[in-house]
Amino acid sequence: MTIAVVSPGAYSRRALALLPLGFLFLLALLPLGRLLLEGWDGVRLELFADDYLQGRLLWSLAQAAITCVLTAVIGVPLAWVLARLAFPGRALLLRLMLLPFVMPTLVAGLGVLTLFGPRGISGLNLQDTPWLLLYGNLFYNLPLVVRASVDGLLALPASRLLAARSLGASPWRAFWRIELPALMPWLSSSLCLVFLYCFSGFGLALLLGGQQWATIEVEIYTLVAYELNLADAGALALAAMLVSATAALFYAALEARMAVPAKTEPLALLKVNTLRRRVLLASALLVLLSITGAPLLALLARAATVEAQTWRLLLNEDTALALFNTLRFSLMALLLASLLGVLHALAARRSTLMRAAAFLPFVVSPVCVAFGLLLLYPGWTASLLLLVSAYALLAYPFIAKSLAAALDALPPNLPAAARTLGATPWRSFWRVSWPWLRPAFRRGLAFAAATTVGEFAVTLFLSRPEWLTLTTLIYQHLGRPGQANLDAALLLSVLLMLFALLAFAAIEWPEKNHAPDR
């Protein structure tokens, strides 16, 4: 007889799924349906025949595709070095590569401007060129491709590669014939995510694209916020959602085809004891530093040089209000996201539909979410409940996905043994299952916290003046002329980066008495 492992008490999976599914229906599906209706009713063929909008759409597709190519060309060699060479600090470096992913978009964008802006410390001004946005895309997405490729290379059974080498294949030929084909499912799925993130990205495109290289998401925001042209904005949002949905379907198909690899003996790491390997390692570290580390280092260096009087900004009333709102909005959203994430993960234990539903907030862009909420609930647009719920919608899938993976790895004999010893379902869950799940919960919570702290698009659509946050305050300073406002934005970005670093530390901080490694 099989004993239920994770469902506490008498709650069925259907009851556990009721709250997260209802939340998704009200905060995602209905607003998206309203957005689709607005776009369908507002479709004008001449709208898509407009040269300006055609250029926006083509550039949105092009910058996402170019980023995919660049991340693949740069990321695969970097991943090979990190997966095959042994060097001091290798494990720490693999963990630190998560850092760009938890950085708020405004911090990353301002870091890129500090490095390659009009008065950038590099001396190279890339403003009003497409390279500025492409570099920002690389900063965010290169670690994603590298980490996925490292996992793919490490999953390759050592016997296959050693057999090819023993039959006379050169290292280069073994890579092309053995390693690269085995890597392709991991690489392809990560590139689908890169395309999705770049095409539907908003913060970086708004800050780095400028007027000439703005993407379709920025155009939707402009039509709504400045021109009140909801019909054309809805039509463009519909087109953007079709592209995003296509990329998401490709990603889901690739994920379904990726079988879980069997446990095999990993390939032994190579010692860095030759000149060629030293050059490979040094080159890889230099490329990683120049793409994923340089913007943050440039931001810190420039912030350290601002005048002393600018530091008094941190004591201003607006800064205190923005800090307070950021913290309270994030805390309220995390409480709701934690509840939704736990219930969603428990309900998805044996439900493919629930697992797929967790991807819904990732598929649609924050701009489309906020726009749909604005159309569906016009009377609630100035409601704190709606703002916090939108934050939670974008954050809780991180918790749900992290917990779902931990639940898959939970040995069924542990809670079963507790039940046979007389423990109630609730006691079995809290005393046996939850200690095992807690590290995964903390990791998901940390990513969710970074998302809520740095959320920008939803705040622009749904916020009120008295709900000033760090992201909106930074954006306000950037929109005002003068060096003093730029310096203020730099200092506030450093403050926002510190909050993101706290989330990153929560991901990597070791937990005492944690569950066994799995």
Image (spheres, grey):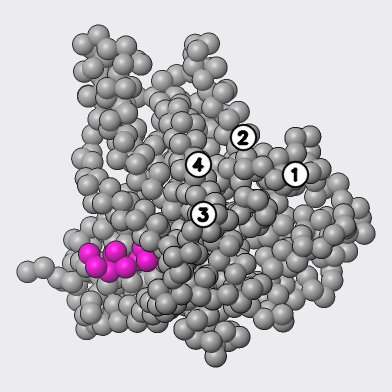
N-terminal of the pair, mark 2 or mark 3, is 3
**Mark 1: few/some/many CA within 10 Å (<14, 14-19, 20+):** many
Q: Amino acid at mark 2?
A: Leu
Disc 3 + disc 1, Cβ < 8 Å: no
Residue 258 visible to an observer of this rendering: yes
N-terminal of the pair, mark 3 or mark 4, is 3
N-terminal of the pair, mark 2 or mark 1, is 1
Closer to viewer: mark 2 or mark 3: 3
N-terminal of the pair, mark 3 or mark 1, is 3
Q: Secondary structure at mark 4?
A: helix
Closer to viewer: mark 2 or mark 4: 4
Residue 325 percent location from the top left of the image: 67, 76
Q: Amino acid at mark 4?
A: Thr
Please name the residue shown 27% across and 12% down the image: 169
Q: Which mark is residue 49?
A: none
Distance from disc 2 to disc 3, alpha carbons, whole Å, reads: 36 Å
Q: Amino acid at mark 3?
A: Gln
Residue topped by disc 3: 54
Q: Is residue 129 above or below residue 508?
A: above
Disc 3 + disc 4, Cβ < 8 Å: no
- The segment highlighted magenta reads 352-360
